[in-house]
Image (tube, rainbow, N blue to C red):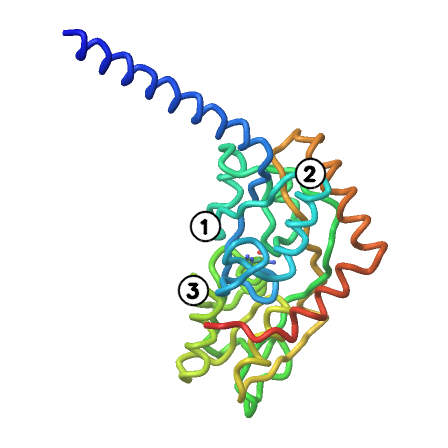
Amino acid sequence: MKNLKKLLAICLMAVLTLSFAACGKKDEGSKTLTFGTNAEFPPFEYVASKGTIGEFDGIDMVIAKQIAEDQGKTAAINNMEFDSLLLALQNGQVDAVIAGMTIDPERAEAVDFSVPYYTATQVMIVKEDSAIAKASDMADKKIVVIQGYTGESCVKDLGYPYEAFKKGSEAILELNNGKCDVVVIDSATASKYVKDNPGLKIVEDADAFGSEEYGIAVKKGNTELLNKINESINKMKADGKISEISAQYMDVQTEE
Ligand code: ARG
């Protein structure tokens, strides 16, 4: 009987210790800034064996890490589908979204965007021998876009039929295999794909595709975090860090 009591006491202690430990963990949680991304968008975010934040690497990952460090926190990544990012932000699953995401009025209704940190445009990726020289040449061609990206809305607005893929890498494979004629995607990502895939080239059309700016999104009304993010971005823009890492990551060979 005595032994049983002793055992019970030990068990109780163990349970208490464990729950305290769990509480401690939760405290540590506030030291983490969780970013949502979709790591299918080189050179901004992709999976690498040794990344900047865990297995995640790219321009955005360096920026995210710096933003967290500026607040004395550690950056964590929640990798998900591009289409789920803004919802995850609204649900409180992530603190911020960094995903080469274009600031657009429709998205800005749902979330708040930081100051812009990168300027891009949509471009066309075609085979080197393609006759496509401007956006209107796509009219009777097989066009591929990435689902939910601004490139999809651009092609939709131009009024051409298209097929939407989940990942840029899948779209490039389709083009390489001759199953489509053109992929419409953001300029820096296009440059990266063309660099890594011989036989492809980029076609630009500034009349058809305007410029876009990337921003970091936070939950609507989270001005406290937004101000801190803006401060970090402005600092990284002023001291040239963003241009420096952008150039650097254009040259990194992505492992896929
Ligand atoms: N800039 C484009 C957009 O906002 C594409 C972004 C894709 N980003 C990604 N991490 N997959 O729609």
Q: Position of residue 231 (x, y in %)?
A: 79, 42
Q: Position of residue 213 (x, y in %)?
A: 71, 56
Q: Secondary structure at mark 1?
A: loop
Instruction: Give the image location of residue 94, x and y in percent.
Output: 53, 39
Q: Amino acid at mark 1?
A: Met
Quadrant, the N terminus = top left
Q: Quadrant of ligand 1?
A: bottom right
Is the residue marked by circle 3 packed among few (<14), some (14-19), or many (20+) residues within 10 Å?
Answer: some
Q: Amino acid at mark 2?
A: Gly
Q: Earlier in the sequence, mark 2 or mark 3?
A: 2
Gap between marks 3 and 1, in whole Å? Answer: 15 Å
Does residue 249 appear left or right of residue 238 in this picture? left
Which tag, 1 or 2, sits closer to the chain's start? 2
Residue behind label 2 places its C-beta within 8 angstroms of ligand 1: no
Going 28% across and 12% down the picture, which residue do you hit? Answer: 9
Front residue (pair 228, 123): 228
> Is 58 located above or below residue 142 in the figure?
above
Contact between labelled residues 2 and 1, with CB atoms less than 8 Å apart: no
The first of marks 3 and 1 along the sequence is 1
Disc sitting over residue 201 in the figure: none
Res. 72 mark: 2
Residue to which mark 3 is pinned: 165
Please indicate, yes or no, whether residue 155 appears anywhere in the rendered image. Answer: yes
Above or below residue 56? Residue 208 is: below
- Mark 1 highlights which residue? 80
- Seen at 71% across and 64% down, the residue is 245
- Specify whether 15 is left or right of 125: left
Residue type at mark 3 is Phe
